[in-house]
Amino acid sequence: MMQSTELAIIGGGPAGLSAAAEAARAGVSSIVLDENPLLGGQIFRQPPAEFRVVNQKRMGKQYADGKKLIEELTEFKEKIDTWTGSLVWGYFNDKELAAMRKGRLELLKADQIVIATGAYDRPIPFPGWTLPGVFTAGCAQAMVKSQAVLTGTRFLLAGSGPLQLAVAHQLLKGGAKLVAVVEAASMIGLWRRLPTLLKQPGLLWDGFRYLATLKLHRVPFMQSHIIVGASGSEEVEEAVIAAADENWQPIPDTEQTFDVDAICLGYGLVPNTDLTRLCGCAHDYDPDPGGWVPKRDEHMETTVRGIFVAGDACGIGGVRVALEQGKLAGIYAACNLGHLDEATADKLARPIRRKLNKLQSFQSVIADLFSVRSGIHSLPEKDTLICRCEEICLDDIRKAIASGALHPDDIKRRTRAGMGYCQGRICGPTILRIAERQLSLRPGDIGPGRARSPVKPVPMSILFE
Amino acid sequence: MVERGAPFQIDVDGQPILAYAGETVAAALFANGKRILRYTSKRREPRSLYCGIGVCYDCLVTVDGLPNQRACMTQVKPGLVVRTQRVVEFGGRQ
Amino acid sequence: MNSTDVVVIGGGAIGASASYYLSKEGLRVTLLERRELASEASGANMGGFPSQVMSDEVMQLAGQSARMYQTLGAELGYDFEFDPTGSYILMDKADQWRRLEENAERLWHRHGVKVELLNERELREADADLAPDIPGASYCPDDFTVNPTKVVLSFAQAAERLGAEIRTFTEVEKICVENGSVKSVITSRGEIRTGFIVIAAGAWSPNVGRMLRLRIPVRPRRGQLIVTEACSRARIRYMLDIDYLVTGYDLEAVKTAEDPRVKLGVATVLTQPPSGNWLVGSSRDFPGYDKRTTIETLRLIARRATRFLPKLKYTNIIRTFAGLRPFCEDDHFIIDKVEEINGLVLATGHHGEGIALAPSTGKLVAELVTKSHTSCSIEQFSYYRFRDRELTEREMGTGTTS
């Protein structure tokens, strides 16, 4: 019943795939598990196998890069086994994973594990955010990239940072009408950081290219503006934005309304740390990526021996960082498994580390410019839902804290926030911020919450196998 | 840019809807203008896709009798029966 | 330095209840809890009050608690989701009638608790979702369910309103005794001067006892639980496996059992709180302070539960968790004053009956502190029934707890 493998890699995005390739190169046999039907994760999302790509060039760079990396894995098909449609939902004992593979239970004992579970869009509650038609930038992107479906006809994009621009570009390419792209930060800061940004000319060029596309399609790009509301009877019909100060605090009497049927929210990403928490890895608060992330050393190994982490799951860094970190994790997992001696591993790691250093300074500028600022917390009103699953509003959360709750687990117990299907992924980051503010704590003083099996709901029938 | 796979019909709330092999239920519903997927139990509010990547569990629909399946992560098949959800159902199909 | 009349150590049902009843007597109380309220067994159980399966020794206190529960919500001003579900012991095999009948007789003749026996047809009429081959059940209309976390919170908040101080995320590091009397408690957030301490720390009471060189014979007994997604409201919302009566969960039966299900102490308990989620339990094993769930036990729990409620197989599991019940050496808890140290009361070891017995236990603690004697006999829960009460030097040195 229990299978074993040298290396289990959880997540088939850039970090997981590059870890698999590097490990395979060193002779390690691995199983890559991903919940989706195809490998690629988010950024390297591929269209379904049943679709036929007619014009490769128009599919974009990420599709091409992803395809290339996935094909690279077939080079090692003796060594790398890919389990798509496979959710890792449980961790029992030492490196024993419970997965649901196409609906069936699989128990996997791994000698080493790489957790490359990526990230998801940061939830930003505001009045009307639960209306049909309000979704994340990641959602719009996934639908356009892999399903070739537009999630609406008249879009407003609200958020901050380069990811939003990439989504805008993709939507426009897909034929969407964009009524505005609203950027919370001011771009002045960008000019001051030009020297650092010039170190990554490719990324900078992408940014300018996206802005140029917006201009070409006459899409207004509004800096220092933030979304403050969405309204509609059954689906979204209107988006309300307002001017914001440098702390993203909405300025009164500056509201503007747009007629839309789709609002895309792109306020950055949050690492998916459910599995690292479940496996008992220690976490640290890191303000740069913005949140609780698993502690890891320069080998990408966590505080649990034999469990590595790579990519956005250990801190938002983007695709290039994910690729390099994945390589490091693959190399050092191979080293732990005895396929590489330390000297060889260090030698292979050196150029990768150099690349990472270069990338990291660019990434921290981006993070600094576009990281979420405190004004975001004044968006939700008393009855705005914070926990979407259990329908718990801001007032409920505040009351629980006022009555003595000092920790997200305590708030969860008292309000049920976090007890629904999404296991606190959507409400978690917001609840932490609310508690910090109400209790006058610094970010990092409390949290993260406890993770429990199953990290995502599984059918009871799976326990019958 | 892409050509879709083979087309077939699925049943959404009793109506025949055109879907394509490889699509998710969410894509098929959205492509046919159906965005409201369920109503919540407490406030009876409409919900749809939110994160689109299988994390938020907002896009829950009943698929072939099994309630609370993510529309964004479920693939269409010929003859698939999809029901948008109004009430909490118990225990799915036997 | 702060000073208070009573320090209660442990923010579970017993500690919170004791804090309330002590505050009611006009005493200043400080409750210390190392994590959040109800963070351990009190927040990891099914919330049921199963008088049908309680032993004779606890029935008096149980009856008292049950009566208190009827009006506690109003008294505390807090809704802890009291649901008069009754309880149903479900038979597994047709040759188990005698056990049910004997139990029913025991409950009526010794304790005046009325129980109705239902045959297969009557049971199906009561709830058609149950498995069709359950030969019968015994139904106790007076049993009920509550939300255990909310019970703890309601006692704590009511105590606060009466002047108690609730200090969560505060650990006890040392207890100072001078001339045979309690003097102060040193916590991770400062020292508190007090004349009275109540140890109500559940499975962690031995740690606290160790600070006083006292052996408190309690150890953690894990119970695992599965929580399903919300389902439509069932007619029968509280059921128990007849194996509670058959194997009794005495340690001997478990030790010698061949059946893995009995070995891991798995017997079905099902409750459905107002949220609609099914809580699916239960199990018993001694893994030390390990609160993780295990795939073996989860499998056994799921399988056994669907024997009684087949539709559960087609629900989604939202989460699983485990609680560490404080198992007292002889399976009976401790409520007593410690003679060797002035101002020390023990109220711990309630195993699977902490929520059920919290109200009456809290009241007894208040009596022990204020009057030194109790309104009803608690001889059988005396600390002095254990011969070895003082820890040896070696035992002081060891100590695997977390």
Image (cartoon, rainbow, N blue to C red):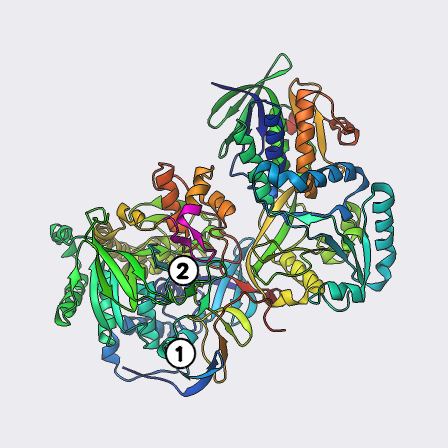
Q: Residues within 10 Å of mark 1 (few under 14, many from 20)?
A: many
**Badge 1: chain ID:** B
Q: Nearer the viewer, residue A357 or A424?
A: A424
Local secondary structure at mark 1: helix
* Residue position marked by numbered label 2 in the rendering: A117
Image coordinates of residue B66 in percent, x first then y, are 55, 72
State the image coordinates of residue C288 (x, y, percent, origin top left): 63, 42
Q: Residues within 10 Å of mark 2 (few under 14, many from 20)?
A: many
From which residue to which does the magenta span run?
Answer: A382-396
User: Which residue is more in the foreground, A110 or A76?
Assistant: A110
Q: Are marks 2 and 1 on the same chain?
A: no
Q: Is residue A344 left or right of residue A104?
A: left
* Residue A120 located within the stretch drawn in magenta: no
Name which residue type carries label 1: Ala
**Disc 2 on helix, strand or loop?**
loop
User: In the rendered view of the protein, which quadrant contains the C terminus of chain A?
Assistant: bottom right
Q: Which residue is mark 1?
A: B28
Which is more toward the observer, B42 or C10?
A: B42
The amino acid sitting under disc 2 is: Thr
| Whole-number angstrom distance, CA of label 2 to CA of label 1 | 27 Å
Q: Give the residue at x 14% y 70%.
A: A218
Is residue A174 visible to us here? yes
Q: Is residue A344 visible?
A: no
The nearer-to-camera label among 2 and 1 is: 1
Give the residue displayed 28% in from the left and 64% down from the top. Answer: A238
Q: Relative to A443, is A279 above or below?
A: below
Q: Quadrant of the N terminus of chain A?
A: bottom right
Chain letter for mark 2, please. A
